[in-house]
Amino acid sequence: MSEDPALGDVLDLLSDEYARDILEATSTRPMSAQELADECEMSKPTVYRRVERLQAYGLLDEQTEIRTSNNHYSVYTATLSEFSVELDDGSFESSLTRTDDESFPGEAETDTADRFKRMWEDL
């Protein structure tokens, strides 16, 4: 979603305890659906429904974890870093701040040596 969603939509989504639990858990480290189900004490179908909604609003990112045993799976990371609501002159204004997502570790580095170091550290 390229622009911020409507205030009511975000408030509705964030009023859901399960969605908030998923955002909290994935704000510290990427987690799989099974890890989220265990950590947040919810069923996997509930996790997948909330993940889908959070992704639709650009609040959760999905990446594929590659395993040598061909058992690839998705992990999720919160992209929401701040949500604010302001009442000014009789109307509400809201804003979402998302974390910057690098396509690969070190992408933001301008120096080649720093880029390689950052990529190597994340292996």
Image: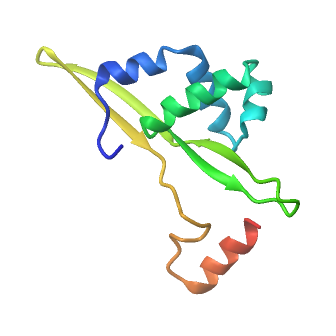
Q: Residue at x 72, y 26 (%)?
A: 44
- Residue 68 on image: x %, y %: 86, 64
| The C terminus: image quadrant | bottom right
Nearer the observer, 66 or 105: 66
Above or below, 64 against 15 in this view is: below
- Residue 26 on image: x %, y %: 65, 37
Looking at the image, the residue that sits furthest to the bottom is 112
- Left or right: where does residue 97 sit relative to residue 35? left
| The N terminus: image quadrant | top left
- Left or right: where does residue 18 sit relative to residue 57? right
- Left or right: where does residue 80 sit relative to residue 104? left
Q: Quadrant of residue 64?
A: bottom right
Rendering colour mode: rainbow
Q: Quadrant of residue 75?
A: top right
- Residue 32 on image: x %, y %: 73, 40
Looking at the image, the residue that sits furthest to the right is 69
Looking at the image, the residue that sits furthest to the front is 70
Q: Residue at x 62, y 79 (%)?
A: 114
Q: Residue at x 32, y 32 (%)?
A: 5
Looking at the image, the residue that sits furthest to the left is 89
Q: Residue at x 88, y 60 (%)?
A: 69
- Residue 94 on image: x %, y %: 29, 28
Tally of numbered discs: 0
Q: Quadrant of residue 56?
A: top left
